[in-house]
Amino acid sequence: MRDNRPAPSANHTGEPVPLQITLDPSAPEAPYEQLRARIAEQARDGRLPAGYRLPTVRALARELGLAANTVAKAYRALESDGVIETRGRHGTFVAAAGDAAARELAEAALAYARRARRLGADDAAARAALDSALRATSG
């Protein structure tokens, strides 16, 4: 039987980089959000290098025991965030880090700053609210 999974990309030493995803069924986060977060984290810290070809939606769903729609939802969110890019029939790849993510982060920061100003917050109050939100989401 033929293995239809795409060959993993190679790391800087030339060795294959396996996709290592574990989901916690008892976690409060939905499975698609856990998957999105794990792939994003691995792309950010370099475990999944730019250009790494991700498994197809169906292959990853089968491997993780998830519905294909769950994996597709995670992939859509990752693509929207600029973490991955789909190249049609060629597959889905980890995007080059930086440009899209940095641009989106700058846009989000500007939107937050404008909203803080409309609410009458000074710099200290805006930073304190942001720091509190970052702490709350750092798991």
Image: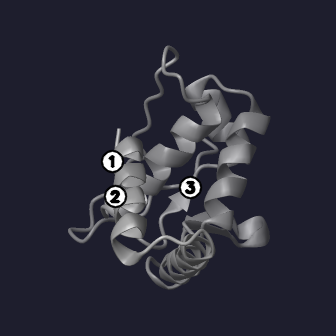
Q: Nearer the viewer, residue 18 or 26?
A: 26
Report if residue 1 is visible in the image: no
Of the two numbered discs 1 and 3 on the same chain, state the one appearing first in sequence.
Answer: 3
Q: Amino acid at mark 3?
A: Leu
* Residue at (54% x, 84% y) in the render: 103
| Count of numbered badges drawn on the protein | 3
Q: Which residue is mark 3?
A: 54
Q: Nearer the viewer, mark 3 or mark 2?
A: 2
* Residue at (38% x, 76% y) in the render: 123
Q: Which mark is residue 61?
A: none
Q: Nearer the viewer, residue 132 or 93?
A: 132
Q: Are marks 1 and 2 in contact (CB under 8 Å)?
A: yes
Q: Which residue is mark 2?
A: 131
Q: Which mark is residue 135?
A: 1
* Residue at (48% x, 50% y) in the render: 39
Callout 2: SS: helix
Residue 67 position in % (x across, y down): 74, 28
